[in-house]
Image (cartoon, helix red, strand yellow):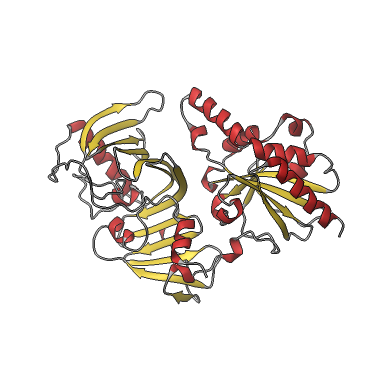
Amino acid sequence: MRSKAIIVAACVLFAAPAVEAQVGPQIPTSPVTASAEVQTRLAALVQAYRQGPTRDSVSIRVKNDRGQTSQSTVQVSVDPGSPTRLRMELGRLVVTATGPIVHATIKSDEARYCEFTLPDGSLKSGLEKLFPKLALPQLVLADRGVASDNLADLGLDPRGVSDVRWRSSRLERGTGRIMLEGDISGGTIKLGIDRVTNRLRTAELTLDDGPVRAIDVSCRAMDAGEPQGWAVDVTGRTKVDALSDLKGDGEVIRVGHALPKTLIFFTTGGSRWEEQSDQFNSVLILTRFNVKPMRDADPEARDAAFRDARRLVLPSVRLRDQLLVGSDGIYSVRCAPLIDEADMTVGMAALLFRVFDSEDNVAVPDRRNETVLLAESSGDFDPVLAGGLASAVVVDKERVVRAIVTLDDPNAAEKRVRAVLEEIGKK
């Protein structure tokens, strides 16, 4: 059985590392008066999240003191009404709250649930007593219990509450966003606000020292739906005491087991795709992919992101093209980039098609080998990737996984995959 630490690490990758007492010069804890322009912008930002239910897809990137970065995406929905309602989707983990009652479930485990009671205090501080620290400003912005005239803590600083000395409010050319910039003890903070909706688009925190040096948050507004439908129905489920008692084994890709039916694939045209049982064995080349840089408003930045993306996925593309040789009528080979389901738009699919499909593959279109998109939230892919960016999953005609091959060395990976295909082809 998995420990709580392992489940949380798999589901809450964006959680900022724990930090000891705050270091460096302290900013006075009394509120610092900002300019009238900044105060107006902050008031509009708060109002945008407290006037009704909201849902954001939030991408969080954390950089540590060794220059290493980790990234995760979470969907957070908050209804500031009475009672307050919450829904967070953190990979496989779903956290919902109605008033003080919190339920935690795993998407593929329909038999169990955890139940907690939020302690008194703000929504964000209460959740952080139950789960790891959450770099989600929405939990503060939408909380009517937090004074709107002094947003001393937006929940970004891993060291705790930080009073902000706001320096400026300006319109950023190119994006059209309102940018607020300020100073905190031992660092800086910057917010990007949509000029039309007044919703948060970006948040950046930089720190001079400590284990965390930067937190970069990117938000995209989504349809909130009906808050009454956010909660997971736990009727008939067994209540367990710990997250470690929730089971999500059905979402794990394991050798000798059928490919999980919970995996959510999309074609580049936007329709749902399923790995159907047919006369072919198949190879799915899973590649973890960050689409955020490709959404940059600056054309030069997008070009640079596109070049970097082509470089990063080159091992996957090369393996796919090498395996296509001799595959006709025997097996299929597809690249499957792992991305947030909220990013599976037609426009993004078109960009990914350009990134993953080589000229040779485009010249001879074949539906058996087309690129498909795989929702990151539909499974636990860390064991499959084994710390790397890509792995090849070999599946037989009965949809049973026969091998998982990492792409540390594409040439060695090709030999291993071909050996497995040859072995299962004899049966």
Q: Position of residue 199 (x, y in %)?
A: 35, 40
Can I make out residue 229 in this image? no
Position of 90 compared to 325: left or right? left
Residue 174 sits in quarter: top left
Q: Position of residue 2 (x, y in %)?
A: 51, 67
Can I make out residue 99 in this image? yes
Q: Nearer the viewer, residue 245 or 403?
A: 403
Q: Nearer the viewer, residue 277 or 321?
A: 321
Image point (73%, 29%), residue name = 359
Residue 8 sits in quarter: bottom left
How many marks on residues? 0
Image point (87%, 57%), residue name = 426
Position of 385 compared to 59: left or right? right
Q: Position of residue 11 (x, y in %)?
A: 47, 57
Is residue 243 positioned above or below 332 on the image? below
Q: Position of residue 107 (x, y in %)?
A: 53, 62
Image point (41%, 62%), residue name = 96
Position of 137 compared to 9: left or right? left
Is residue 309 positioned above or below 256 on the image? above
Residue 251 sits in quarter: bottom right
Could you tell me which quadrant the C terminus lies in? bottom right
Is residue 91 positioned above or below 56 on the image? below
Q: Nearer the viewer, residue 224 or 167?
A: 167
